[in-house]
């Protein structure tokens, strides 16, 4: 099943990137996907895309995607307003926040999804301390937990829900 899962994800990416519906592209994509599936399947388990068909997971992934889309658009508009009105004060800085992401995949997803929102860009992570460092355009007031709630908390809550893992309390 590992080969099938990797090959299926690879084929979906192939279709999304090529966006061509010819027999040649479909067959080439299938062959490349199977080769990638065979090569990468020994690296570990990967849930297949069919796991998104579970209603709770589909709803959680939809909520996560919606949150990222809305906040990415809003932060891009705020950044454009800052650029067009350069006299507005900018309180940018570096913020270190705790994270509830534990696995490599969770950390990668939190880093990518939070960085799509241009208000905060992941700079570094300290796995041993379960902390992330962000460059932010507007440093949130309050402590590290307040910053976590503002920056990575919503993404982590939605992501962990999509993965079927409850967020731990600290």
Image (spheres, rainbow, N blue to C red):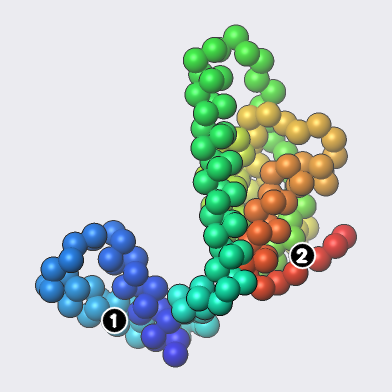
The residue where tag 1 is placed is: 35
State the quadrant of the N terminus. bottom left
Question: Which image quadrant is residue 128 in?
Answer: bottom right
Task: Please indicate, yes or no, whether residue 104 appears anywhere in the rendered image.
Answer: no
Q: Secondary structure at mark 2?
A: loop
Residue 148 vertical placement versus 4 (above, below): above
Residue 91 in the image: x percent, y percent?
69, 23
Q: Is residue 84 visible?
A: yes
* Nearer-the-camera pick, 27 or 100: 27
Among the 4 quarters of the image, the one containing residue 141: top right
- Which of the 4 image quadrants contains residue 126? bottom right
The circle drawn on residue 167 is 2
Looking at the picture, how far across and down is residue 150, in whole percent? 73, 42
At x 78% / y 58%, what residue is drawn?
129
What percent of the width, then of the height, locates residue 46? Answer: 50, 79
Q: Which residue of the protein is positioned furthest toward the front in this rendering?
A: 55
Q: Going 74% across and 56% down the picture, which residue do you hit?
A: 99
Residue situated furthest right in the rendering: 170
Picture layout, residue 155 above or below residue 102: above
Classify residue 164 as left or right of residue 143. Answer: left
Expressed as whole percent of the image width and height from the top left, the position of residue 153 reads 72, 51
On screen, residue 77 versus residue 7, left or right, reads: right
Q: Is residue 95 above or below residue 85?
A: below
Tell me the quadrant of the picture where the C terminus can be found.
bottom right
Q: Is residue 114 above or below residue 78?
A: below
């Amino acid at each position: 099943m590992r080969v099938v899962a990797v090959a299926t994800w690879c084929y979906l990416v192939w279709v999304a990137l090529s966006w061509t519906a010819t027999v040649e592209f479909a067959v080439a994509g299938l062959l490349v996907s199977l080769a990638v599936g065979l090569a990468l399947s020994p690296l570990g388990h990967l849930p297949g895309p069919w796991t998104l068909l579970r209603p709770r997971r589909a709803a959680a992934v939809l909520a996560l995607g919606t949150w990222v889309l809305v906040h990415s658009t809003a932060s891009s508009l705020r950044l454009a307003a800052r650029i067009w009105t350069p006299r507005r004060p900018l309180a940018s800085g570096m913020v270190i926040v705790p994270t509830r992401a534990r696995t490599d995949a969770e950390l990668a997803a939190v880093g990518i999804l939070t960085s799509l929102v241009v208000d905060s860009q992941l700079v570094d992570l300290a796995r041993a301390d379960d902390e992330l460092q962000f460059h932010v355009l507007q440093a949130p007031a309050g402590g590290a937990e307040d910053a976590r709630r503002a920056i990575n908390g919503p993404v982590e809550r939605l992501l962990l829900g999509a993965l079927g893992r409850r967020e731990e309390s600290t």
